[in-house]
Amino acid sequence: MACCDDPTELPRMDRRELIRLQEQYGDLVRDLFTEDPEKVILKLLNNSSAYLTELAALRAHHPSVRMKAIDLLEKPSLSVLRQIAQKEPASAFGLAAQARLDALAR
């Protein structure tokens, strides 16, 4: 019997947490199969991490998702907004990124 936690042993996940994650995954798959995927992605975007929001702002397939992601970006993501504004200056995405930069500068 060991007195301490073994750092080489993988941490065990709480069974309740595993069940919650499985249900969440099942709900997501069901929604993607039965609803409009664009609406599902927009809903998920509101609760996503900064990294995923930045990724959506840069490369999302649906234009509405990219625009929403650009609108959700905050000060830590200024470099992403600048990148979009520089790479696509005349597009709707570039203009939205520039507008968001201006709003965050105030």
Image (cartoon, rainbow, N blue to C red):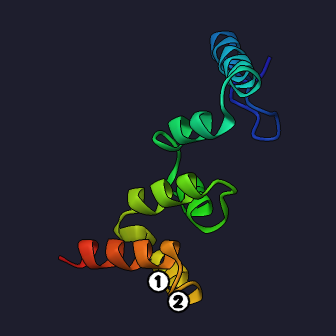
In this view, the residue in front, 43 or 17, is 43
Helix, strand or loop for disc 1: helix
49 to the left or right of 59? left
Residue named by callout 2: 86
In contact (CB < 8 Å): disc 2 and disc 1: yes
Residue depicted at x 52% and y 44%: 45
The numbered mark at residue 66 is none
| Residue in view at x 47 percent, y 83 percent | 82
Q: At 56% from the left edge and 52% from the top edge, which residue is drawn?
A: 65
For the question of whether residue 80 can be seen, the reply is: no
Residue 106: x %, y % from top left: 17, 76
Q: Which residue has dot 1 on it?
A: 82
Q: Is residue 21 above or below residue 60?
A: above
How packed is label 2: few (under 14 Cα within 10 Å), some, or many (20 or more)?
some
In the image, residue 66 lies at what x, y percent? Answer: 55, 59
**Label 2 is placed on what type of residue?**
Gln
